[in-house]
Amino acid sequence: MSTIAEFRLPAAETTLGVALEHVPDATFELESSVSKTRPSLWVSDVDRETAEAAFEADPTVAGHELLVETESRLLYDVNFVDETVRLSDELLAEGGSLLEMWGTDGWWQVRVRFRDRDALVDAYDRLEEAGISADLRRVSDVSGVTDDETQLTPEQQEALEAALEHGYFEIPRGISMEELADELGISHQALSERFRRAYETLVDDELQPAGERSRLE
C-alpha cells in the first residue's frame, strides 16, 4: 500500500527562496519530465524580463536557459550551485516518487508518493534534520481511497466551499475571483491554482477507477 503525502515547505529553507520572494505573485512549477538530469521549471504570471531577473538575483541559481515561451508561461532549464539544498536528498532518498511541486509567495507545495507510511516518517525526519520546517498537510493511502472520498487538499476544499457560499459558481457570479481571493486572504493567482488543481482532482475522482487515478500514477 503506497502513501501519498503533501508538504508545504518554506522556499527560504529549501530552494529559490530569493526568486520566489522577488516575484511573489508568480508560480514556479516543476516540469514533470523524468528524462532530464537537471530540473526544468514552468514560470507563470510574470514576464520574461522579471522572471530572469528573479533567477539572477537568487544565489542558489548558477544558470538558467529559456526553453519555451508561450502567452502565459515560460519554461526554463535551471542549474543550481553545488551547496544548494536538494529536496530530492531528503524526500526521495528511499525510493519516493515526486508527483508534483510548485511554489508561490515564498512557499513550495510538494506531493510525493512513498512505498508506505514508514518511508514517509523517515523522509519527514530527514527534512527536520536538514533544518527544513516541513508542514505535512495531507496523508492518504492509495488503496484506501473509496468511491466517496476525494484527494482534495484542505486548501482546495476551503476554496471550493467559499466559492459556493459566496455565489462564485452562480450566473451571474455573486463574487469575482479577486474578491474571493481577498476573502480567503490569498493572491488571485494562488486561488486560481487551487481551483485548477481541485478541478483536475475532481475530474480524476469521477472518471478514473478508485486507486487508479491518473494523478497518483
Image (cartoon, helix red, strand yellow):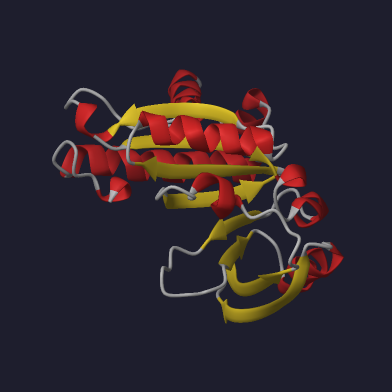
Q: Can residue 77 be seen in this view?
A: yes
- Residue sitting at the far top: 165
On the image, which quarter does residue 134 sit in? Answer: top right
* Most foreground residue, 6 or 175: 6
| Residue name at image x 46 percent, y 18 percent | 165
* Residue 141, placed above or below residue 188: above
Relative to 180, is 45 above or below? below
> Relative to the observer, which residue lies in front, 84 or 63?
84
Q: Residue 63 in the image: x percent, y percent?
A: 74, 76
Question: Residue 83 occupies which quadrant of the picture?
Answer: bottom right
Q: Residue farthest to the left?
A: 209
**Residue at position x 47%, y 29% in the image:** 121
Task: Please state which of residues 56 and 124 is positioned toward the viewer in this rendering.
Answer: 124
Q: Is residue 72 visible?
A: no
Q: Residue at x 39, y 50 (%)?
A: 95
Q: Please state if 62 lies on the left or on the right of 39 as rendered.
A: right
Residue 119 image point, x, y percent:
41, 36
How many numbered dots are placed on residues in this image?
0
- Res 208 quadrant in image: top left
State the image coordinates of residue 60 (x, y, percent, origin top left).
78, 62
Q: Left of 167 or right of it: where is 61?
A: right
Q: In which quarter of the image is the N terminus?
A: top left
Left or right: 96, with 159 as reference point:
left
**Residue 181, image x and y in percent?**
62, 32
